[in-house]
């Protein structure tokens, strides 16, 4: 077996969306030092885009908004067509109030299943009722920067009130409300957010601020009423569903009466904003006084540790929660997931069944099905998946897991998942895998570019890149990519016939 074949055997990870994985105990390979890389064009492009965007973002945060706007615009004009990057930055432009730049990016997207859900959710959440001139957009973006990032809420709010500019914009009223909110002037904040909503009652960003103002004003029933309206908005994408969940946890934090319950929801709010360290500190402090809610606090701690890849701590706290309350859904689900990860499939099955009794969420049933599959009972798994898919057609975990027993739906389900969770790197790799299998190397390259942008150190990326390069006749570059794959993860090897690849035969 020559060097390429050895590296292939070491690196080959056939996507679990299409093929069954297997592990072996091969000794790690010592890859030679690589002085050049196989994907240099992608590296240069990626580094340029990220550096340019970071520079523009820093200028925005520092309130050098006109220069920031020009930098963002220059980047947009020079960027090659890439739906993933356009959507990613389009959402950031909308968050900053640079709506014309966001529109520019949206207009350059392909109108396909990858982009439609995100565009719809982005506009539902951020967009004003009508587009402003470029001059007014920059002026209001400058106000946003000063209020949010530069501790100038009072001064900026006063300036907005004393200018006749932007008077036709509901977004101006939103910024005045935000300025008063940041200054803790809640009555005036409520007045101006109501003005904004009167002009644009479908903007969820406005409704979210109103709910927070009401909750902070101790108007709990009104805050919960606004929250209920927000939750009825049919967001499809992971990013915007998480924004709604974060708003919900903040409102529950402010409206709960018991201190321990407040801490629980505050910690959950931090966790949903990717501030897990803050979340765990709040929960660990709450444990000392939270006897009535200790099982909930332990369960959330266990879940946070699990989602941050700390399984030992996750098991410790989930087990404590379960010991105190054997009906705690979050604790049961975490224990189920931990046992599945440990390949204790009979135990995971039992825990998933218990979790199912506590919640209508599809997660436990997906867990039951994947446990059956791991226990070599594919027909039971398939039956559960097919039933779940009738009512949960946009559930990401369900779509991905069901492909293990219904692989013929890959053409339909993988793009659907990509359309609701742009940051799911495994999906882009799965799409690349499938495109390679079909011999569509152009699309495979597009999907791999997205994967590289998300995580440039994913060893599966380099394996699939090697297949594309080999198919194009670039054998030397393919070998370099395989060496890079082995350098990142030399312990993993897939069970394949010696000298054989699923994609290009012997």
Image (tube, rainbow, N blue to C red):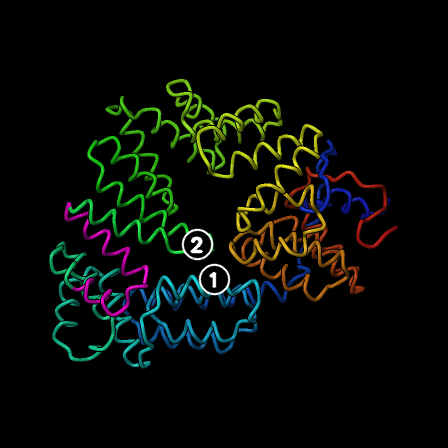
- Tell me the quarter of the picture where residue 147 sits: bottom left
In the picture, the disc for residue 118 is 1
Query: Where does the image place residue 79, in percent across and percent down from the top left?
Result: 52, 73
Query: Where does the image place residue 12, in percent across and percent down from the top left?
Result: 73, 45
Label 1 element class: helix
Magenta: main secondary structure = helix
What's the residue at 47%, 25% (across, down)? 315
Q: Is residue 489 left or right of residue 144?
A: right
- Could you say which is closer to the camera, residue 480 or residue 192? 192
- Give the extent of the magenta segment: 192-218
What's the residue at 38%, 77% (across, down)? 70
Packing grade of label 1 (10 A; few <14, some 14-19, many >=20) is many
Q: Is residue 418 above or below residue 364?
A: below
> On the image, numbered disc 2 is attached to which residue?
239
Q: Is residue 301 above or below residue 400?
A: above
On-image quarter of the N terminus: top right
Asked whether disc 2 touches disc 1, contact meaning CB atoms under 8 Å apart, the reply is yes
């Amino acid at each position: 077996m020559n060097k390429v074949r050895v590296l292939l055997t070491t690196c080959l990870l056939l996507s679990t969306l299409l093929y069954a994985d297997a592990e072996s105990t091969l000794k790690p390979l010592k890859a030679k030092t690589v002085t050049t890389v196989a994907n240099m064009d992608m590296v240069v492009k990626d580094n340029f885009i990220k550096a340019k965007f970071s520079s523009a973002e820093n200028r925005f945060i520092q309130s050098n908004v006109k220069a920031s706007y020009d930098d963002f615009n220059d980047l947009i004009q020079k960027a090659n067509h890439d739906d993933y990057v356009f959507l990613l930055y389009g959402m950031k432009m909308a968050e900053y109030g640079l709506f014309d730049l966001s529109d520019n990016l949206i207009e350059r997207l392909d109108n396909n299943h990858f982009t439609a859900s995100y565009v719809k959710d982005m506009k539902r959440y951020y967009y004003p009722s009508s587009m402003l001139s470029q001059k007014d957009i920059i002026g209001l973006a400058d106000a946003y920067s000063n209020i949010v990032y530069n501790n100038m809420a009072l001064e900026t709010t006063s300036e907005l009130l004393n200018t006749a500019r932007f008077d036709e914009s509901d977004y101006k009223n939103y910024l005045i409300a935000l300025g008063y909110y940041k200054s803790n002037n809640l009555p005036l904040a409520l007045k101006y957010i109501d003005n904004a909503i009167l002009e644009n009652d479908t903007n969820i960003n406005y409704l979210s601020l109103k709910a927070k103002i009401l909750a902070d004003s101790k108007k709990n029933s009104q805050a919960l009423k606004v929250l209920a309206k927000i939750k009825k908005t049919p967001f499809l994408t992971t990013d915007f569903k998480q924004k709604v969940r974060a708003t919900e946890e903040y409102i529950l934090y402010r409206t709960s009466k018991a201190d321990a319950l407040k801490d629980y929801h505050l910690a959950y709010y931090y966790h949903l904003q990717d501030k897990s360290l803050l979340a765990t500190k709040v929960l660990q402090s709450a444990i000392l006084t939270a006897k009535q809610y200790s099982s909930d606090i332990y369960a959330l701690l266990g879940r946070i540790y699990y989602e941050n890849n700390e399984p030992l701590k996750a098991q410790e706290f989930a087990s404590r929660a379960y010991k105190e309350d054997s009906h705690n859904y979050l604790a049961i689900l975490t224990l189920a997931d931990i046992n599945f990860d440990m390949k204790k499939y009979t135990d995971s099955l039992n825990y998933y069944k218990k979790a199912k009794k506590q919640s209508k969420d599809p997660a436990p049933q997906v867990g039951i099905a994947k446990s059956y599959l791991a226990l070599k009972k594919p027909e039971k798994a398939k039956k559960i998946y097919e039933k779940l898919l009738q009512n949960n057609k946009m559930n990401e975990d369900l779509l991905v897991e069901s492909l293990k027993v219904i692989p013929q739906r890959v053409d339909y389900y993988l793009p659907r998942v990509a359309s609701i969770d742009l940051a799911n790197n495994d999906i882009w790799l799965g799409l690349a895998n499938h495109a390679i299998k079909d011999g569509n190397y152009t699309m495979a390259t597009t999907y791999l570019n997205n994967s590289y942008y998300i995580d440039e150190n994913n060893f599966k990326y380099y394996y699939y890149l090697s297949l594309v390069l080999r198919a194009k006749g670039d054998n030397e570059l393919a070998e370099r990519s395989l060496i890079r794959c082995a350098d990142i993860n030399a312990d993993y090897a897939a069970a394949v016939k010696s000298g054989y690849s699923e994609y290009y035969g012997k």
